[in-house]
Amino acid sequence: MKTQVAQLKANAQGDLPLLQITDMHLFSDREKDLLGIKTVQSYEAVIEHASRYSSECLAVLSTGDLSQDHSEQSYIDFTTHIKTLEMPCYWLPGNHDIQAVMLPSLLQQGLAQTRQIISDHWQIIMLDSQVEGVVYGGLSEQQLCFLQQALDEYPDKHTLICIHHHVLPVGSAWLDQHILKNSQPFLDLIESFDNVRAVLSGHVHQAGDILHNGICFMTTPSTCVQFKPNSDDFALDSQAPGYRYLSLNKEGDISTRIERLEQGAFTVDADAKGY
């Protein structure tokens, strides 16, 4: 696998302040909605909200499901708005993305595919957990080998791993059936390195923070629809669209918080039974 590597210089304090913006589910038609929320419009509102961090943050991590209708226009719209934050954007595919459309569309707009980001005290590894044609995730032998290689390469750097699918159950049966299916080889690998600090995911459309064997597993709200936590059956949450701010400290600590739009700006269809 050809690996694209980017360099990202830390700020004056040696830290990496970042944004995670995930699960946009964009359509080519800005008036089209997903479960009651017009996803293009909620995405634009999140980007406008996140612009307050443009002078502070050094990059955006976009962890999959950029598009809902797989159209070239949806990927162009994603790029157009993310560029207004005036910082590099590193992205990976989710289960809803079609990579045959996604990759050329983003490349055409100047968003290169990057799998490894190297900074002064940290490295960030972007993994592809998409299993084509299904909702659940999996890591191919190729991806696991790349992860092993990246971790071997920089044993002295703190490591953040980004992946679309959640790795640990979130306590919602209908979501947890769509988890990263081969999580154990992944967990065995990262737990054999004492410099892996955190795993950052999207997919579940809700905020989560689980400490497991010394590694923090974080999930983040979608820029559109939110799924109700701890719900065994499909259920939507009334919380507003959001994103995550995180700062990777040079000592290996992570400061993070969830940011959301004003409550009520976008409202889901409370009667929806699935999608």
Image (cartoon, rainbow, N blue to C red):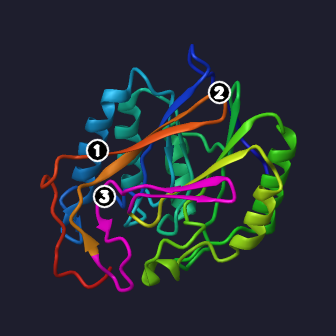
Residue bearing the label numbered 2: 250
Q: Residue at x 38, y 75 (%)?
A: 230
Q: Nearer the viewer, residue 257 or 132?
A: 257
Amino acid residing under circle 3? Ser
Query: Which mark lies nearer to you, 1 or 2?
Result: 2
The correct choice, above or below, for 245 with respect to 171 in the image is above
User: What segment carries the magenta color?
Assistant: 206-235
Task: Verify whether residue 211 appears in magenta.
Answer: yes
* 3 or 1: mark nearer the eye: 1
Position above or below: 196 against 266: above
Q: What percent of the width, then of the height, locates residue 170?
A: 48, 71
Q: Give the residue type that dot 2 points to.
A: Lys
The CA distance from mark 1 to mark 2 is 28 Å
* Residue that numbered label 3 is attached to: 28
Please give left or right for residue 43 compared with residue 247 in the image: left
Q: Which residue is mark 1?
A: 46
Q: Residue at x 75, y 68 (%)?
A: 140
Q: Secondary structure at mark 2?
A: loop
Q: Quadrant of residue 72?
A: bottom left
